[in-house]
Image (tube, rainbow, N blue to C red):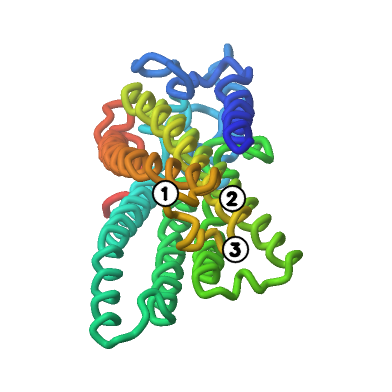
Amino acid sequence: MLLMVVMITISVLWMADPSRRSRPPAPADVGAGDAPDGEGELAVDESGLVAPGVLCRACGYNLQGLAPDGLCPECSTPTARSLRGDLLKYCAPSWLRRLQVGLLWIIVGIIVQAVLMSAMPILAGVVSGVTAAAGLPSGGAMMTTIMVAFGLLMGGLNVLYVIGAWLVTERDPGRADDEPVLSARRLARYGIAAAVISGPLQTVWQQGGRAGWAAATPGVVAALVVVAITVLGVATIVGWVSFLVYMRRLVLRIPQRALARHARIVMWGYGSYMSLGLIVGVLAFTAFPGGTPPAAAVTPQTMSLPVIVLAVGACLMVPAGLLFEIWAVVLFFFCRNALRDVESQTRTHAWEASVPIVGESEPA
């Protein structure tokens, strides 16, 4: 069911891709799809004025009917800067810099979370040794408190993803604000933010299963918690899939087809891996209070089907998660480098040697 939701989301985003819709023929929409690497034709009509549908690359003002050698009435950016298509090298450098900063936030978030996840077993072993030496029962209140604190910390680190995604998905000022309500850019912004709530909620409920109070929670409340975790989890998956769809469209505007292919692979892999994790989590929360099977249920003689499914799912999630987390970091790193190169192109293109860079004053 969850895999179907992800597949339907990808299909809807693909159908809603603005590059698939017909646009005025004047702006050379190079890079929005699988366009060649060459320069776009000047977006002017038969009379030599700016053609319909051309927006200022700096502020989005409609430049139709203006002289190509004039200035934007809204922000005084030279009109010539907006006449050569949709490649990122014709966009405002300040916007391109924000894309790079956003990707850096996401890369740092992935690496920090991976380091903490690797350190967690060591911390658990140290706590178990200390409690055993002190004669305390293992897995007691101390371990539960540490695990809850760790889960809240991991959930808090999702804020890094939200900041990064918010910067990367900032609307291109040179594009019309006519995108669908459920566009990839908007879904990525708000879907990834759901992880800030779902992560801590899932951790607290899971530790409640170990502590015993989850089993004592009224059935209606427990069901609502599981539903909330499921809905927030689906929103997070849709957010990340949408983000990778949007990243693919961005790199096609560089254009970098190799990065676009990797973005598509990571999109499917990430979506499938996260869907598997959510399915395993929902099964666990449904079968056991707090999603944690009792110790008596994991012996070879008493293992039930839910326990077996959870064990197999967990075994599949670890290598899949490691693979696609590393792949995503490498992808975002190369995307960031490509965007930095594109930003430098905005300063070195011969056609704009006499055109001031957007947002920068001319030397005195």
Q: Residues within 10 Å of mark 2 (few under 14, many from 20)?
A: some
Mark closer to the chain start, 2 or 3: 2
Q: Nearer the viewer, mark 2 or mark 3?
A: 3
Disc 2 + disc 1, Cβ < 8 Å: no
Quadrant of the rendered image containing residue 144:
bottom left
Q: Is residue 149 visible?
A: yes
Residue denoted by label 1: 300
Q: Is residue 343 visible?
A: no
**Which residue is located at x 62 percent, y 51 percent?**
230
Mark closer to the chain start, 1 or 3: 3
Mark drawn on residue 330: none
The amino acid on which the numbered mark 3 sits, given as a three-letter code, is: Pro
Q: Position of residue 322 (x, y in %)?
A: 31, 43
Name of the residue lying farthest toward the right: 220
The amino acid on which the numbered mark 2 sits, given as a three-letter code, is: Val
> Left of 240 or right of it: where is 119?
left
SS category of the residue bearing label 2: helix
The correct choice, above or below, for 331 with respect to 351 in the image is: below
Say which quadrant the N terminus sits in. Answer: top right
> Left of 324 or right of it: where is 241?
right
Q: Position of residue 40 (x, y in %)?
A: 42, 18
Quadrant of the rendered image containing residue 84:
top left
Mark drawn on residue 282: 2
- Tell which of 216 and 124 is nearer to you: 216
Label 2 to label 3: alpha-carbon separation: 11 Å
